[in-house]
Amino acid sequence: MSISRLRMATDGPGVSTLVTFWGCPLQCEYCANWMCHDALTHRESYTPEQLVAILRQDDIYFKMTGGGIVFGGGEPLLQAKFIHDVCKIIDPLWKKRIETSLYAEWDEIELLIDDIDEWFIDIKDMNAQIYKSYTGKDNSIVIENIKKILTRVPEERILIRIPYIPNVNTSNDIIKSIAIIKRMGISRIDQFEYVKFDIKL
Ligand code: SF4
């Protein structure tokens, strides 16, 4: 959907370029990227080589700051093959990070296991009922994928994001989610709050 250059400290360390992809299997009530569900959203199409040519403009910033490319969305894992092809041809000194719900087929995740340096996983809430009420989906696939990814990726390369979602979960629910994630063996947890904007058109 977009390529956002020269981002600082919003998507991991250093200067990064965020590449967002259209499409997401979840239907989060407060989706901040609603354009990823809208068939009318303007979308560009790139080959891996064309995308890398754009990224190369910030080569020096990536290398000097420990930044690089961040794949986001929507759900970037829907484009796992494209991401894999990009990672094969980019400078090995650029960091490759992904922002995902991990609501995806394991094959898509596995394809990127050796490509991605850091995984930012937004789990919403670990409670199945809360997850379903907020996203419309069953979170068992997410939990299974977290378990599997932990067998292949060192836990220090995983950051779990747990939002406080107004009218959806409570501070108590968040404490429970954090406890479950820690029991699974992950220590890097980012807890934050969704801000709901009342936009009157
Ligand atoms: S996972 Fe992200 S992109 Fe997908 S519906 Fe939820 S907030 Fe929107």
Image (cartoon, rainbow, N blue to C red):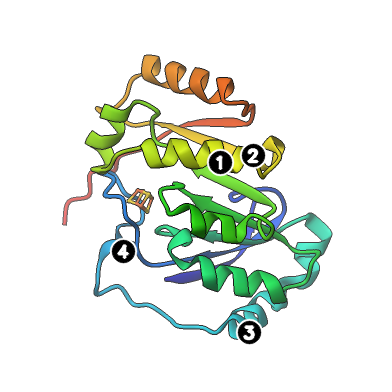
Residue type marked 1:
Lys
Residue picked out by circle 1: 148
Residue picked out by circle 3: 49
Residue 11 in the image: state x and y as whole percent.
60, 51
Q: Do callouts 4 and 3 mark residues in contact (Cβ within 8 Å)?
A: no
Which mark lies nearer to you, 3 or 2? 2
Along the polypeptide, which appears first: circle 3 or circle 2? 3
Closer-to-camera residue (118/69): 118
Residue type marked 3:
Glu
- Label 4 and label 3: CA atoms lie apart by 25 Å
Question: Circle 1 — which element?
Answer: helix
Q: What residue appears at the point 63 percent right and 74 percent down from the top-left corner?
A: 86
Q: What residue appears at the point 26 percent right and 36 percent down from the top-left corner?
A: 132
Which mark lies nearer to you, 4 or 3? 3
- Label 2 and label 4: CA atoms lie apart by 34 Å
Residue picked out by circle 4: 35
Closer-to-camera residue (144/118): 144
Along the polypeptide, which appears first: circle 1 or circle 3? 3
Mark 2 is surrounded, within 10 Å at the Cα level, by few (under 14), some (14 to 19) or many (20 or more) other residues, namely few
Q: Is mark 3 within 8 Å of ligand 1?
A: no
Q: Image quadrant for the N terminus?
A: bottom left
Residue type marked 4:
Met
146 shown above or below 43: above
Question: Circle 3 — which element?
Answer: helix
Residue picked out by circle 2: 151
Residue 175 in the image: state x and y as whole percent.
45, 16
